[in-house]
Image (cartoon, helix red, strand yellow):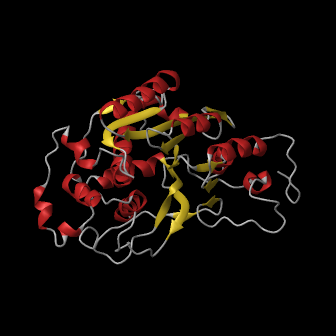
Amino acid sequence: MTPPGQNVSQAVLSHSCTRNQSVESIESFRSFPDRLKDFLYYRHCRHFPMLLDLPDKCGGSDRSSDVFLLLVIKIPPNNYERREMLRKTWALERKQNGVQIRRVFIIGTMGSGFEKERLNKVLDLEQSQYKDILQWDIADTFQNLTLKQVLFLEWMERNCPKVRFLFNGDDDVFVNTNNVVKFLQNLKDNDGSKHLFTGNVRIGLPPFRTECKYYVPIQVYRPKVYPPFCSGAGFLLTGHTASVIYNMSQSISLIPVDDVYIGLCLAKAGLSVSSHAGVRVADVHFDSKRVNDYDPCFYKELLLVHGFFSEKMYYLWHLVNDPNLKCFGNDK
């Protein structure tokens, strides 16, 4: 949602990115919602100042292969409590099964005037303590998620080019990072230098042509279906694949749905997406043997579940990682 007093154009205009007036000639342009008009006016803009940077996050570009798993979490500036919770649970930076896990939050800006200044100050204070925030001076809106992803990939190419694997996802997911590490370590003949892109796959999904959050008119994307893609709630990929996506993005116009855009980049590169049964986005079902959705045994074998509030995440993380947890029917 665009915060009060701010839209895409305000964030872009402050950095001398020229508004592309020619888009007004697009058929039915005047009927588009304002947020889509702003997106089209400025979607050619790809370069923005960084407000908070972490050039040494991976130990320098030459040593970035030491980072086995980089957690890349999309989150708005005002979600301070959520960031604190993630730092204490699945996004905790640590060594797991002998390999390094690192974390970055990718963030834009919100509000204007004092509100924007206040939120940026909070982020600056967090950065001084945790050193885990990448922030660009762009409006943190749904339509700008694609831009935020491309800016992150550019940052990665520059600062973490040899990272082996990445998790990329939202701030409201529960990720069993212990299982993620085990899954990645058990891959055959892939140390991060080959293709992998896996999550909850969407195939044959048509664009939403009527007004909604995911609205993409035919004037912006003409095909009747999207290429296969993984839900942006959370997916896993290799450093190699991340680099390919970034290279493909240089010649593909942005669209205002970030997970679909990544699918477009993969399709152009001729790379596949794969489904992982342990990634649950919109199809979480509890059988009759489960007491409720707080049963830690349900989550113990999964990689990711979407739709978590902070207190539930904190509670389950500690239950799932309790060494005394006993789950009947499995020996793990």
Q: Is residue 229 left or right of residue 20?
A: right
Please indicate whether residue 23 sits to the left or right of residue 122 in the image: left
Whether residue 53 is visible to the viewer of this picture, yes or no, is no
Q: Is residue 198 left or right of residue 283?
A: left
Q: Position of residue 18 (x, y in %)?
A: 13, 46
Relative vertical location of residue 121 with respect to residue 296 in this rendering, above or below? above
Query: Where does the image place residue 124, in percent across and percent down from the top left?
Result: 42, 25
Q: Position of residue 8 (x, y in %)?
A: 27, 48
- In this rendering, is residue 80 above or below 129? below
The part of the image, by quadrant, that contains residue 15 is: top left
Q: Is residue 294 above or below residue 260?
A: above
Number of numbered discs present? 0
Q: Residue furthest bottom?
A: 224
Does residue 112 show up? yes
At 75% across and 51% down in the image, what residue appears?
300
Q: Which of 77 and 274 lies nearest the eye of the viewer?
A: 77
Residue closest to the eye, 154 or 41:
41
Residue 67 position, x and y percent, is 54, 35
Identity of the residue drawn at 36% across and 34% down: 115
Could you say which quadrant of the image residue 306 lies in?
bottom right
Q: Which residue is at 35% across, 29% downward?
A: 117
Q: Is residue 3 left or right of residue 49?
A: right
Q: Residue at x 19, y 42 (%)?
A: 13
Identity of the residue furthest to the top in this view: 128
Q: Nearer the viewer, residue 119 or 224?
A: 119
